[in-house]
Image (spheres, grey):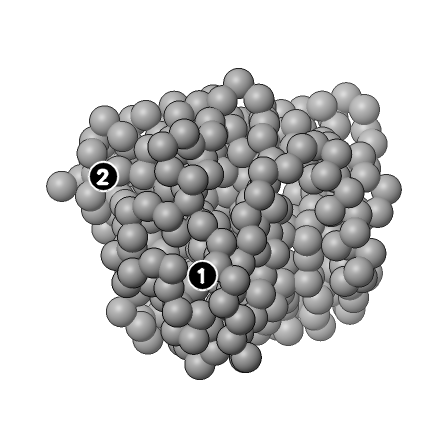
Amino acid sequence: MAATAVCAGCSNRPVQGVLVPTNQQVEGTARVPILVATTRKRATDDPGQMYGGERSDALSYAAITVSIPPDRKPGSIQWPAALPGDPKRDFVTVSAEHIDHRSFASSIAETARRTGHPRVLIFVHGFNNRFDDSVYRFAQIVHDSKAEAVPILFTWPSRGTVELKSYTYDRESANYSRDALEDLIDQLASYPHIKEIHLLAHSMGSHVTLEALRGRSMRLARTRGPDKVKQAMLVAPDIDVDVFRATIKRMGPNRPKMLLFASRDDGALSLSKEIWGGVARIGEVGASEPYRTEFERERIAVYDLSGLKNSASNAHSRAFDDISDVMELVRQRNMQQAPQVARSGPRTTPTQQQTETASLRN
């Protein structure tokens, strides 16, 4: 029961073949290109899966384009009832290919040049996500938020099943992948055409993200060099509250701006708390006192999503299901803070303020 409730990637969708490309073209659809870096092993039994849930000892890369149907509710993912799917009403895969490191790097440069967006957005998914789950969810986020960034999916080896043993396997896979995520961030930071790096992490993905950023912050403290990582958005983070406090303290001032999205009614994290010995999870209590005041004092912007109940979404994925409302919360907060910034001095540039207002647009 606990493992089922913690599920973040559950959905009614075909078991196999989702990422097999279709050549159907329908007017009004939107195409979302995504670059992928993964620590998963390639799938051998399903060409439409591309990558499975087993661990690889090296990063692999892919390029995928997803078609999104018109006239749909923002936040929703229309899985095809049967393959290949109907582009008029379903998410479908337009192209999907494995690429090498050189092609990955050149694609980033080309996309940044073509779009004029010198920043990247890295999405790190959570527990119980098949590879195709993470691809379609990220495509939905990029499309609905009108992201002004090069979208990069970092996907780690999740089994994509709702057994308790899969939850523990996924947690260890997240730990296994933290160095690879840190290496990816370093790699992107080395590209001269990329000026900013933003991270968006969900649930258990927040753990691997925070670990990777902790390593970078410790290194930057020694070098005292500037960092291109500007902000990390932690959505429903499945992180022990004491571990979170200790990690933030260890990172010190050399860490990016952080945005925390929490829901007091997140049942998945409530059950995760029981699995981990009764210690509160940040994504459930972070917007409550005394935590909220404590985190705000540490320059962590806290957003309480408990009141966003305009859809039938699960609290654990509310930030993505109700993405328009969440973006409005961020916009309102930045408008309230703007006069304070003007009075106290130029702490952030207009460009940075625009970026923060679009936290889920970046």
Instruction: Give the quarter of the figure containing the N terminus.
Output: top left
Q: Residue drawn at (81%, 39%), measured in percent from left and top? A: 191
Q: Is residue 276 left or right of residue 36?
A: left
Q: What distance separates the C-alpha of mark 2 from that of mark 1?
A: 25 Å
Q: Assess disc 1: are there few (<14), some (14-19) or many (≥20) residues with their C-alpha within 10 Å of its C-alpha.
A: many
Q: Is residue 319 left or right of residue 67?
A: left
Q: What is the secondary structure assignment of the residue under circle 2? A: loop
How far across and how far down the image is residue 313, in percent? 30, 65
Q: Residue drawn at (38%, 60%), measured in percent from left and top? A: 84
What amino acid is found at the position of numbered circle 2 in the picture? Val
* Residue named by callout 2: 162
How far across and how far down the image is residue 337, in percent? 65, 67
On screen, residue 99 above or below 265: above
On screen, residue 72 above or below 295: below
Instruction: Give the quarter of the figure containing the C terminus.
Output: bottom right
| Residue 298 visible, this angle | no
> Farthest residue in the top direction?
57
* Residue named by callout 1: 92
> Farthest residue in the right direction?
192
